[in-house]
Amino acid sequence: MATHIIMDHSGDTRHHFDVRDLKALADAERRFKALTGAGFTAATRQANGDISLVRSFDPAAEETVFYPRLVGG
Amino acid sequence: MAFWRTAAGLNAAAVRHIANMVRAARARQRARFEDREARGMALLREWLSPQQLRQLEAHNYFEVTGCNSGTRYRIQYGVSTNVVELDADGRPRMGWCFIPEGNLVAGDVMLAQKIALESNERDALAIAKQFVVPPRRPDFPHCAGGALH
């Protein structure tokens, strides 16, 4: 199962999906595009703990976190 | 007289009832906030490196290395004015103020700051505001406000 973790006012909202399920995968890709289009940044974590930003939907990513646009505090 | 005594008794009961309702609402609000806080910190802990997790548990902060400059930053527990740039000796040099939009909890804010500095330091600092860190009180930074950099 892959997971999209979206930071929000509740802490976070998690969406789990099976990458073998084509409909779930399409929904996940739509969610990715909608969030990044709205200014969210997406980052994935590799098995060794390394974190990298992702600009396009990666079906192989096990865990993707989305955070809202950064602003000067 | 009996009427006024009854009316006063009813009023007191109503006041007690309202006070109880307010107390219950405050308790529910506090519980929701604590739940949000806990979820944010749990997510942060999941994404920290083992060394960063040890720092957080011990000091309520952790350090990251900027991906572009190699500069070390300390991310302290908090939702604003909580990122401090360190000099070569590990002393606070200046503060950087940048946060994700929205009313996010501390764990979420700190994770977004970590990812930004480790993966896209230049862009993060481009939108950040600098603030002065008093040398004796690095744990209580003073936000100077000011221009975007």
Image (cartoon, rainbow, N blue to C red):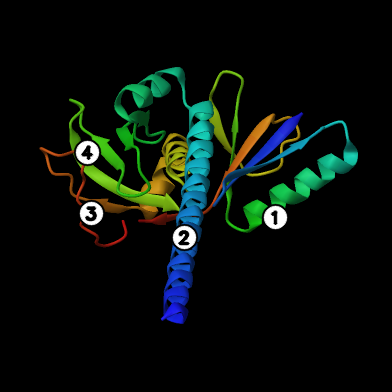
Say whether residue B47 is visible.
yes
The residue beneath circle 2 is: B22
In-image side of A68 versus A30 (left or right): left
Name the residue located 49 percent from the left edge and 37 percent from the top edge. B38
Asked if marks 4 and 2 touch (Cβ < 8 Å), the reply is no
Q: Chain of mark 3?
A: B
Which element carries disc 4, helix, strand or loop?
loop
Residue nearest the viewer, comparing B27 with A29: B27
Q: Nearer the viewer, mark 2 or mark 1?
A: 2
The residue beneath circle 3 is: B143
Pointers 4 and 2 within a single chain = yes
Name the residue located 47 percent from the left edge and 65 percent from the top edge. B13
Dot 4 or dot 2: first in sequence order is 2
Pointers 2 and 3 within a single chain = yes
Q: CA distance from mark 3 to mark 4?
A: 12 Å
The residue beneath circle 4 is: B139
Amino acid type at image mark 2: Val
Q: CA distance from mark 4 to mark 1?
A: 38 Å
Q: Nearer the viewer, mark 2 or mark 3?
A: 2
Asked if marks 3 and 4 touch (Cβ < 8 Å), the reply is no
Q: Chain of mark 4?
A: B
Pointers 4 and 1 within a single chain = no
Question: How many neighbours does mark 4 have within 10 angstroms: few (below 14), some (14-19), or many (20 or more)?
Answer: some
Which element carries disc 2, helix, strand or loop?
helix
Q: From the viewer's perspective, is residue B13 above or below residue A40? A: below
